[in-house]
Image: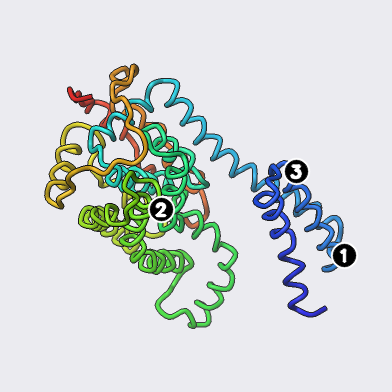
Amino acid sequence: MPLGLLALIALLPIALALVLMVGMRWPATKAMPLAWLVTALAGVLVWKMPLGFVLASTLNGFGGAVNVLIIVFGAILILYTLRDSGGMETINCGFYGISRDRRVQVIIIATVFSAFLEGAAGFGTPAAIAAPLLLSLGFPALASAMVCLILNSFPVSFGAVGTPIWFGLKNLKPQVEAAIAASQAGDITSFAMFLKTIGQWASILHLPMVFILPLFVNMMMTRFFGQNKSWKEGLGAWKFSLFASACFAVPYVATAFLFGEEFPTLLGRAHRHRPGGGSGQKGLSSAQRIVGLRPPVRVGKRVDRRHPHYGQVRLFKPYEPVASLDALHPHRTHPGAHPTQRPAFQGLGERMGDQHSQNPRL
């Protein structure tokens, strides 16, 4: 059978799922089993796979899906816990107290905060947590989803503490070790060094997007969702956008070169000032004055900052479950772990929880 025809048959299940879910609006519970059936039939009839192998592959897929569902379930559980305990209102007021400018909120929440969530948990948690956060701040629903999904791009290679690299490339270990033994791997002397090199190049390749995407997304937001429908309003935040991107990019690349593929996204965001009140609010307010972000751009509706639950939950208490994701991440036990793979947030909740800030403007 021609190679081109085989490629088309292999593409058929993916195309079928897209047509059914996007074009015909079928739910995944109906579309995906049909796509699986087409895949199984193609494997048995075209590639002559044994039926037992198809069933074993199906069970393996179920196992992988369970791992992803457990992580996503944890993120959704945290989201609902924060919402029902009043923690989400505390976070909202903290972010809203930093700036009422939608462009700044997009950079802080959809860029750096989402990058932290991607680095800690991955698997869609930035969209599951950051998008509702923007929505609760008054962003239109489509704008919230758009900015979070587009900006969750350059952090993905280091998502879930480097899982796409150290787990995605683990099957290359025999080939890499064979190349090292044959002195064909250049300066690479181990598989761990190979993974670190991949992380370094990934950070360099992503670097232009770290500066381009936040500004581009702001322009799209003000053009399609802003009151004035203007590209220029989004472009007006270029100084602050480049400033924030530089603050993220320097530790992002430096961490990839110094520590490896696990921490660039986490530490790229973790150096940021704390949101709401105190030094974080003063620092960002000063940065906004320096780069000339006046007056603030409004997108969507205004929200009441006097939330009934604000003040019942300490400012950094809501961040403790998110910070614990890294300490509990299963990658800590994978073979060949780097010496730097220790719980990165040990004691963070206790240190930060005592820094409850009272902001009289909220």
Residue 307, numbered circle: none
Q: Position of residue 85 (x, y in %)?
A: 41, 20
Q: Is label 2 in a helix, a strand or a loop? A: helix
6 and 30: which is toward the camera: 30
Instruction: Work out how far the residue at label 1 is from the one at label 2, CA to CA, in angstroms.
Output: 42 Å
Q: Earlier in the sequence, mark 1 or mark 2?
A: 1
Q: Which residue is mark 2?
A: 151
Say which quadrant the C terminus sits in. top left
At a point 18% along the width and 48% down the height, the residue shown is: 293
Res. 357 image quadrant: top left
At a point 19% along the width and 43% down the height, the residue shown is: 295
291 and 121: which is toward the camera: 291
Q: Earlier in the sequence, mark 1 or mark 3?
A: 3
Q: Earlier in the sequence, mark 2 or mark 3?
A: 3
Residue 295 versus residue 320 in the image, above or below: below
User: Which amino acid does the dot numbered 1 rest on?
Assistant: Leu
Image check: 359 left or right of 322?
Answer: left
Residue 238 versus residue 201 in the image, above or below: above
Q: Position of residue 156 (x, y in %)?
A: 45, 55
Say which quadrant the N terminus sits in. bottom right
Q: Which residue is mark 1?
A: 45
Res. 88 image quadrant: top left
Q: Is label 1 in a helix, a strand or a loop? A: helix
Instruction: Work out how far the residue at label 2 is from the one at label 3, CA to CA, in angstroms.
Output: 30 Å
Instruction: Work out how far the residue at label 1 is from the one at label 3, CA to CA, in angstroms.
Output: 23 Å
Q: Which residue is mark 3?
A: 30
Cβ–Cβ under 8 Å for marks 1 and 3: no
User: Which amino acid does the dot numbered 2 rest on?
Assistant: Leu
At a point 25% along the width and 45% down the height, the residue shown is: 272
User: Which amino acid does the dot numbered 3 rest on?
Assistant: Lys
Outermost residue to the front: 228
Cβ–Cβ under 8 Å for marks 1 and 2: no
